[in-house]
Amino acid sequence: MKRSSNASIRASRKVRFLRRATGWPGLVASALGLAVALLPAPLAAQSLYGCRDLASAQTPAVEGRQGVFFRIDPDLLTYNRFSDEVVAAIGTLAAGLAERGTTFIVVPVPTKALAMPEYLGPDIAAYGYDPALAASIYDDTLARLGAAGVEALDARHALRTAVSGETTFFRTDRRLTNAGLFALAREIAGRLGDSPADTAPAVYKTEQAGALTLPSQDRLNLQMHCLTPLPEVTTMGFETVRQEPAATDAAAPVVVVGTELTGAPDLNFAGFLSDLTGLDVAAHGPSSDPVAAMSAYLTSDDYRQTPPDLLVWEVPSWANLGLHGDQPLRELAAAARDDCERELAVTQAGDDRIRVELSGISQDRALSLLLDTGTDAARADFHFVSAGGQPRTRPVARAEGQPRTGRFYMPLTGLWAEGSAHVEIETVIDPGALPRVALCRG
């Protein structure tokens, strides 16, 4: 800005001199035009790829150093959305999993800006981003999770200290590269120690499979605002193979639930974790919503019949897990325990509608209803009615693309002090069998 200002002053002085000396308007206009043309271009225009107006792209972004692009939201958010209520709910989930013998590790994936601050450019000043403050808030989140009894992985440290010839995030995409996934897997493996006593470690072999280029909507959105081709979403491909066959009926002792950040099928997160631990790893997901991914797994037959020794939950640190209120997180806690102590009588109340009497049931905050439809229903509407006839409706809906188990948990909280007289549940019903409804702890 100082250079531009000085140049403008010099141009103005030249115009005044010419006007006094000659009085020729045409010469004055020519001199002024030449001075303006020689002014330096704005800083924002200095792009390696001729990018313009990235803030108005479909995914608003800024261009950093060496072809690394950062989304304005969430990469340039100094804060995250792990509220005290969300942290407490994750602690309740961890306690429920522990009751069934499952060790729970939460992996809060940092933003690209937290993991790769050396690639940030000067444009971050316009958005008030403070890398040091953002790192402190991330570390505070880990401390609060630990205080709630949750084992949380310092993924920021793992990604910052990764040793590789490539970045841990793709330059033009929000996902982690195989280099970043290996760094996370190595950090998780270091937390596990020895294999469980009843699980003999297996031998895995991981080999390079050549360069891998992934399709990317993020890159396409950016390219629409740039003149020259942007870096491809390319990483080294790997393949991990177990060296001896596994028992066909054995459940994997390690399960990873996460989002597209780690769960892309072409990437090798589960393979790296198997190689480093000697344990079979099953990946569930990915989903754009980490709560939806976890509810799909915890309500599945896989979890209900054989809980894993270790459950890893990959959660973007910027995700708002409480976006839809507390019901989804309470559902996770109830599904984790799967402790249903009483079957309730069910009667048909119309097409795709059943009725369950609730009179006399305690309004304990730790109680939930389990609805098991036996179908692939994506939604259930619980229409509660008080003893005085007051209605209150609560829906439970599965995210688009989420695996459907037909099971829904509804906490009996926030209703009436005297409890509910009955509930009518509207959902897809198998004509040959009424859904099952049970009263569960959690």
Image (cartoon, rainbow, N blue to C red):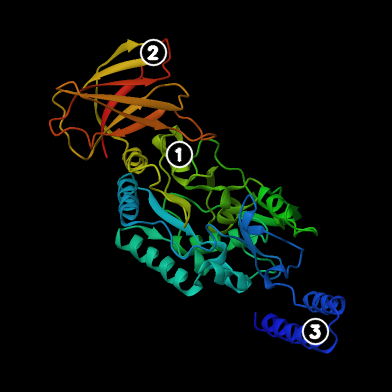
At numbered mark 1, what does the secondary structure look like: helix, strand or loop?
A: helix
The residue labelled by disc 1 is 297
Q: Nearer the viewer, residue 234 or 339?
A: 234
Q: Nearer the viewer, residue 268 or 207?
A: 268
Q: Position of residue 282 (x, y in %)?
A: 53, 44
Nearer-N-terminus badge (3/1)? 3
- Label 3 vs label 1, nearer the camera: 3
Which quarter of the figure is the N terminus placed in?
bottom right
At numbered mark 2, what does the secondary structure look like: helix, strand or loop?
A: loop
Q: Is residue 159 left or right of residue 29?
A: left
How packed mark 1 is, by other alpha carbons closer than 10 Å (few <14, some 14-19, many 20 or more), is many
At numbered mark 3, what does the secondary structure look like: helix, strand or loop?
A: helix
The residue labelled by disc 3 is 19
Q: Quadrant of residue 10?
A: bottom right
Residue 98 visible from this viewpoint: yes
The residue labelled by disc 2 is 433
Which quarter of the figure is the C terminus placed in?
top left
Residue 193 visible from this viewpoint: no
Q: Is residue 285 above or below residue 279?
A: above
Q: Position of residue 420 (x, y in %)?
A: 19, 26
Count of marks, rendered view? 3
Q: Position of residue 303 (x, y in %)?
A: 42, 38
Question: CB of mark 3 within 8 Å of CB of mark 1?
Answer: no
Q: Position of residue 286 (x, y in %)?
A: 55, 44
Three-letter amino acid code at the position of disc 3: Arg
